[in-house]
């Protein structure tokens, strides 16, 4: 029905398009720009095709390689045990103060300009500051690793197979990190949503409504309604190996979702459209609903929650930012003083022969 409503309007648009190009006062350039805008407007975003299988074993259907590779595990930590020394030093030397004292330490090893007889006396204070900062960053990153482990090891019911005798679906508890695009999951009341999931069925057979709280997404504590598309059948056995779900490529728009479910009743093909009202997002929590069954459409870093989250920057206090600015000013002034002193020395030494009390050294 939706396609039938769209086709006449599209036909009218196509019929009117040639007339627009020959409007009174139009130049060839304006006509070309108008055609270019209309061609860009007709371009659709990338789509992904997800295979549905609710009849056989879950692993009997293989998704596309790019979908199989995308797991639901998340990582908010900055370092690993291997890259910590290198990454942390790299970030610490983005601070102007550390670079300044490193240059001072290098100059101290140069006998011609050193006042410490070549001993880098600045090495110990600089190493102490770098070590204390590294310990602080390591403790913070350990807490991020713990949070990631807790989040990735939460469990959810995942469809595995159907009982060969009763044909009832069998769900098994699996960690969130084991989910992937195409996994069919069963959610219960007050459970947190592990990924972006398109609804296929729920415990409300009349209104087919699922209530979710999206405080983790937009801060709103009031419950919102998400519905199973009315055209979808209640018998989930129709989602055999031929069934597919075609949806948008991953994006960060929380209120945007466009998908089409294709399934077969016998030999007849049926298609049902889905919108943002038919998807529940990671970061929300199911409320006032006994259960709901859906398919994972975006997992891990592709979920809308993760795509909207910003990377944690290197923490710097306002006092440290001001100190870095002052350090740059000090460094610039020292450079000016050194250049001025070098010029004055050359000028003075060039005219040293004019002074009778200055004699040239024997050696």
Image (cartoon, rainbow, N blue to C red):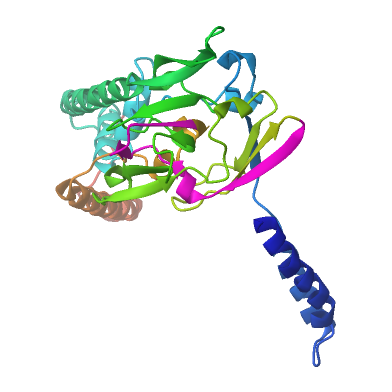
| Quadrant housing residue 21 | bottom right
Foreground residue among 270 and 36? 270
Q: Return the x and y of residue 84 as percentages of the image width and height.
A: 34, 21
Q: Residue at x 45, y 20 (%)?
A: 158
Is residue 123 in sight in this rendering?
Answer: no
- Can residue 44 be found in the magenta stretch? no
Q: Return the x and y of residue 3 as percentages of the image width and height.
A: 69, 56
In the figure, 234 relative to 333: above or below?
A: above
Is residue 206 in sight in this rendering?
Answer: yes
Looking at the image, which residue sits at the far bottom? 25
Q: Residue at x 44, y 45 (%)?
A: 227
In the figure, 323 relative to 116: above or below?
A: below
Q: Quadrant of the N terminus?
A: bottom right
Highlighted range, magenta = 267-294
Q: Is residue 212 left or right of residue 178?
A: left
Looking at the image, which residue sits at the far top? 165
Q: Quadrant of the C terminus?
A: top left
Q: Return the x and y of residue 281 as percentages of the image width and height.
A: 41, 40
Q: Residue at x 32, y 21 (%)?
A: 154
Q: Residue at x 39, y 41 (%)?
A: 305
């Amino acid at each position: 029905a939706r396609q039938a409503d769209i086709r006449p309007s599209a036909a009218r648009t196509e019929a009117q398009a040639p007339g627009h190009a020959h409007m009174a006062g139009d130049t060839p350039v304006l006509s070309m720009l108008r055609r270019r805008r209309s061609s860009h407007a007709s371009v659709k975003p990338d789509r992904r095709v997800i295979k549905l299988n609710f009849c056989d074993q879950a692993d009997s259907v293989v998704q596309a390689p790019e979908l199989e590779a995308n797991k639901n595990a998340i990582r908010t930590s900055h370092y690993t045990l291997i890259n910590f020394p290198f990454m942390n030093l790299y970030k610490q030397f983005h601070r102007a103060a550390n670079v300044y004292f490193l240059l001072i330490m290098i100059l101290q090893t140069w006998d011609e300009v050193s006042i410490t007889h070549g001993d880098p006396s600045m090495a110990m204070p600089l190493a102490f500051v770098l070590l204390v900062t590294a310990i602080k960053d390591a403790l913070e990153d350990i807490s991020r690793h713990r949070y990631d482990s807790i989040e990735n090891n939460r469990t959810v019911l995942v469809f595995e197979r159907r009982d060969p005798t009763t044909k009832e679906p069998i769900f098994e508890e699996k960690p969130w990190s084991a989910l992937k695009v195409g996994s069919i999951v069963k959610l219960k009341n007050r459970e947190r949503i592990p990924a972006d999931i398109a609804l296929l069925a729920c415990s409300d057979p009349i209104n087919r409504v699922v209530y979710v709280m999206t405080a983790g997404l937009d801060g709103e504590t009031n419950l919102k309604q998400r519905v199973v598309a009315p055209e979808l059948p209640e018998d989930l056995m129709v989602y055999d190996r031929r069934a597919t779900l075609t949806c948008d490529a991953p994006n960060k728009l929380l209120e945007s979702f466009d998908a089409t479910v294709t399934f077969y009743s016998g030999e007849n093909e049926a298609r049902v459209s889905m919108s943002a009202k038919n998807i529940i997002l990671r970061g929300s929590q199911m409320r006032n609903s006994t259960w709901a069954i859906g398919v994972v459409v975006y997992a891990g870093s592709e979920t809308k929650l993760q795509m909207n989250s910003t990377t944690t920057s290197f923490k710097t206090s306002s006092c440290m930012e001001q100190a870095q600015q002052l350090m740059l000013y000090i460094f610039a002034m020292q450079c000016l003083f050194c250049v001025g002193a070098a010029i004055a020395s050359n000028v003075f030494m060039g005219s040293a022969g004019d002074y009778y009390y200055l004699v040239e050294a024997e050696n």
